């Protein structure tokens, strides 16, 4: 059983080299559940012997529903906004501000840091990565901004937009209010890395020749602005329902999406504006959702037979702060979602502040290499010249982000005791 999981893990790590989408080996990991079932079947005649397996599967299905439902609802909202050219119009407005190469670098990074907690690091990298690829006249500048985009997108661990923060919320390890306390550390780390990129990389380039002149883009489609306001209200309303009325976030966001689609119906009836929701449904990243189903089920199987008890022992043997620091480093080469699932399934006896650190370090640790996070993989798909080696050229800036965020968290919670 462990061999199946290790083979699947190696295939996920080398997905780029193998030209294989990582959801395929992740789904292969689900076969570990069948192996457990076969073991119980061969272990005797007691009709009760399957009960532990049945209980494990029921618990896993509950966790999966919350995660998959939330991600599908959020992706649907993002795709609806994308169909109305909301993000394209936002990018075009930035270009027309005359910010210049340096201004664009900072504004895009800041927007990624502020938007990724709500619309996911993958989405912000896709939006701003494609934008900079369209307007950049120099591959060195494109690479620089892509690195900044990856770091700032992964810094969105202070709310529900990144998978690591979402997973600890859905596992009831922390609340949204708890995660908001990560805002200073997460954004501070990105700011330090952006300073390093600006001072030691961007200043070496001729900023007057980095952008293409007269770039054009599609404008906002009819109903786009009002729909953006409705979607924003739906997301904010979902957060309020969760924090005030204790409605689970996936149900709260599903309610918000219901309001959005009803507004789309009203736009068609009153204004003749047609938005084909069937097309937007097809754009949801179902491969990513299947990936989560596979790795979480596989982790549940490993936990069922006791393998994750070693992770729990690690937290009990060493200082939890440094275990989380090490997990952050490991997430540079092992998918951060898989690591977060392992930590949650192991269920170590640690405090809220340590679960916050765990979500942050595993989340931002994925920036250390380009294959460590979905944001990095997205950047490589946008610009084929942005490779593993290209990202390593910016390692000083990425390390500053990692250490800076950790340092400020340590000051907040270990020195000042904010919790």
Image: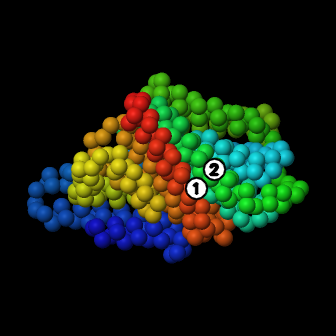
Crowding around mark 1 (Cα neighbors within 10 Å: few <14, some 14 to 19, many 20+) is many
Residue ID for mark 2: 194
Judged left or right of residue 3, residue 167 is right
In this picture the colour scheme is rainbow
Crowding around mark 2 (Cα neighbors within 10 Å: few <14, some 14 to 19, many 20+) is many
Q: Residue 269: in sight, yes or no? A: no
Q: Position of residue 185 (x, y in %)?
A: 51, 40
Residue 286, quarter of picture: bottom right
Q: Position of residue 269 (x, y in %)?
A: 76, 35
Quadrant of image for the C terminus:
top left
Judged left or right of residue 270, residue 179 is left
Residue 327, quarter of picture: bottom left
Does 17 appear above or below 69? Answer: below
State the separation of the CA atoms marked 2 and 1: 7 Å
Residue at the right extreme, as displayed? 214
Q: Position of residue 375 (x, y in %)?
A: 57, 56
Which residue is located at x 65 percent, y 36 percent?
231
Q: Position of residue 101 (x, y in %)?
A: 78, 53
Dot 2 or dot 1, earlier in sequence: 2
Which residue is located at x 36 percent, y 64 percent?
29
Task: Find out whether the residues at labels 2 and 1 contact each other: C-beta distance under 8 Å.
Answer: yes
Does 272 appear above or below 123? Answer: above
Judged left or right of residue 79, residue 267 is right
Which residue is located at x 56 percent, y 58 percent?
396
Does 181 appear above or below 285? Answer: above
Quadrant of image for the N terminus:
bottom left
Mark 1 residue element: helix
Residue at the left extreme, as displayed? 45
Residue ID for mark 1: 397
Mark 2 residue element: helix
Q: Which mark is residue 157?
A: none
Which residue is located at x 84 percent, y 57 percent?
208
């Amino acid at each position: 059983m462990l061999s199946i999981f290790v083979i699947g893990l190696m295939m996920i790590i080398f997905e780029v080299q193998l030209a294989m989408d990582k959801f395929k080996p992740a789904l292969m990991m689900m076969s570990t559940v069948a192996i457990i079932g076969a073991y119980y079947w061969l272990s005797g005649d007691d009709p009760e012997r399957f009960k532990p397996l049945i209980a494990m599967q029921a618990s896993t299905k509950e966790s999966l529903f919350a995660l998959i439902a939330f991600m599908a609802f959020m992706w649907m909202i993002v795709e609806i906004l994308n169909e109305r050219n909301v993000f394209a119009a936002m990018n075009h407005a930035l270009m027309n501000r005359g910010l210049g190469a340096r201004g664009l670098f900072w504004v895009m990074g800041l927007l990624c840091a502020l938007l990724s907690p709500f619309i996911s690091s993958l989405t912000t990298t896709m939006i701003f990565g494609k934008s900079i690829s369209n307007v950049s006249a120099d591959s060195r500048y494109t690479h620089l901004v892509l690195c900044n985009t990856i770091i700032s997108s992964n810094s969105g661990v202070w709310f529900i937009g990144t998978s690591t923060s979402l997973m600890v919320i859905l596992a009831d390890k922390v609340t949204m209010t708890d995660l908001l306390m990560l805002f200073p550390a997460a954004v501070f780390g990105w700011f330090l890395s952006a300073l390093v990129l600006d001072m030691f990389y961007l200043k070496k380039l001729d900023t007057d020749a980095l952008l293409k002149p007269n770039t054009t883009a599609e404008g906002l489609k009819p109903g786009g602005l009002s729909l953006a306001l409705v979607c924003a209200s739906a997301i904010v309303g979902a957060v309020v329902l969760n924090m005030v009325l204790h409605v689970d976030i996936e149900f709260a966001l599903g309610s918000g999406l219901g309001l959005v689609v009803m507004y789309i119906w009203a736009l068609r009836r009153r204004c003749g504006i047609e938005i084909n929701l069937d097309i937007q449904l097809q754009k949801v990243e179902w491969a990513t959702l299947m990936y989560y189903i596979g790795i979480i089920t596989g982790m549940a199987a490993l936990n069922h037979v006791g393998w994750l008890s070693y992770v729990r022992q690690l937290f009990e043997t060493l200082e939890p702060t440094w275990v989380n620091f090490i997990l952050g480093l490991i997430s540079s080469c092992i998918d951060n979602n898989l690591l977060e699932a392992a930590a949650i399934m192991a269920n170590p006896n640690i405090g809220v502040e340590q679960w916050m650190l765990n979500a942050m370090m595993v989340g931002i640790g994925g920036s250390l290499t380009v294959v460590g996070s979905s944001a990095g993989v997205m950047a490589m798909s946008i610009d084929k010249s942005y490779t593993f080696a290209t990202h390593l050229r910016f390692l000083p800036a990425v390390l500053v982000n990692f250490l800076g965020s950790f340092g400020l968290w340590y000051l907040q919670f270990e020195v000042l005791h904010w919790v």
